Amino acid sequence: MKFRIATILAATVLLGGQAAVPPLSDSNFQAPDRSFQECPECPQMVGIPAGKFLMGSPAGEPGRFDSEGPQHAVTVKAFALGKYPVTSAEFLAFLNATGHQPQPCNPLLGLGWKQLHRGQAATPAGVEPPRWPAVCLDWKDAEAYIAWINARARAVRPGLGNRNPYRLPSEAEWEYAARAGTRTARWWGEEIGGGHANCNGCGSKWDNKLLGPVDAFDLNPFGLSGMLGNAWEWTADCWHPSYVGAPADGRAWTDNFCIRRVVRGGAWNNVPIFVRSAARAAASENGADQDYDYSTLTGFRVARDLP
């Protein structure tokens, strides 16, 4: 499964007689951990190799939900994924630059990101550390941030033209990256163990109390941090209650009318059954449906197409 991101990004690829996205400079992608950062505002990305995996959980996996089946083979193209979830500092930079105003994730408590005045925004509580994952965000906030990152990338790389290479990961890409070549319930093994993640029973100092830093735990074999626990993460997919009819090519499974999206990974206050590579949940795009409102605990990480 190992590869060099230079192999993917280095050569200009011709598609239908047209030059594809031009390569990043060597200084951006020659890192031993396959990481690169395309623009000053862009998240740190990690190249994920192409491959095939079994998506979902086996029938006997402890904590399994029916929505995690049936298991099915999925082929995933090479792509890049954020090494970390988008942080409070990164999302604040976006708010300060654009004036975007997220909706409160808890209207009753007035909990939400705030625009104080032009060019100055504040986190929901006003005291979130800069390396916490940005949460209290709905799906449309994630999409707005990604649109800004695409614009910043085009500004430093005119060869992108009008392309938008940054996006949310598909659910299949997310699980493939979380598993990182493993078939166990978590990338580190079947059991939750101690000190691998932040949840209600994960054995960390933040368990069931508050968020932890995005870089608090070991990287998985693909070089990604915090794929399980701490905060839920949005994906591009509409919610479906099972994988019957799911695509097998790694693309997002979307519908013409979609009000709920898939969130992955589990959060700091969830018990360990939610902190598994196959665990999934549904969340309203705008947090309005309280039966499915995960937005107070949900952030996201960014994916990027590779040539």
Image: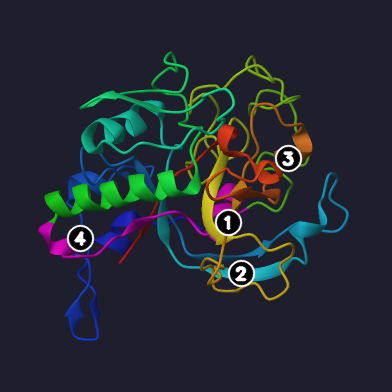
Q: Which mark is residue 176?
A: 1
Looking at this view, is 7 or 83 the one in front?
Answer: 83
Q: What is the CA distance from the residue labelled 3 to the residue labelled 1?
A: 17 Å
Residue 295 percent across, percent down from the top left: 57, 38
Seen in the image, is 78 located left or right of residue 118?
right
Q: Residues within 10 Å of mark 3 (few under 14, many from 20)?
A: many
Dot 3 falls on a residue whose secondary structure is helix
Q: Which residues are magenta?
A: 158-181
Earlier in the chain: of badge 4 and badge 3, it is 4
Q: Are marks 4 and 3 in contact (CB under 8 Å)?
A: no
Residue indicated by mark 2? 74
Q: Are marks 3 and 1 in contact (CB under 8 Å)?
A: no
Q: Are marks 1 and 2 in contact (CB under 8 Å)?
A: yes
Q: Are marks 2 and 3 in contact (CB under 8 Å)?
A: no
Callout in the foreground (3, 1) = 3
Earlier in the chain: of badge 2 and badge 3, it is 2
Q: Which corner quadrant holds the C terminus? A: bottom left
Q: What is the CA distance from the residue labelled 1 to the residue labelled 2?
A: 9 Å
Asked if residue 246 lies in the magenta stretch, the reply is no
The three-letter code of the residue at mark 4 reads Pro
The three-letter code of the residue at mark 3 reads Phe
Q: Quadrant of residue 118?
A: top left
Residue indicated by mark 3? 274
Q: What is the CA distance from the residue labelled 4 to the residue labelled 2?
A: 27 Å
Earlier in the chain: of badge 4 and badge 1, it is 4
Kindly tell me whether residue 102 is visible in this rendering.
Answer: yes
Q: Residues within 10 Å of mark 4 (few under 14, many from 20)?
A: many
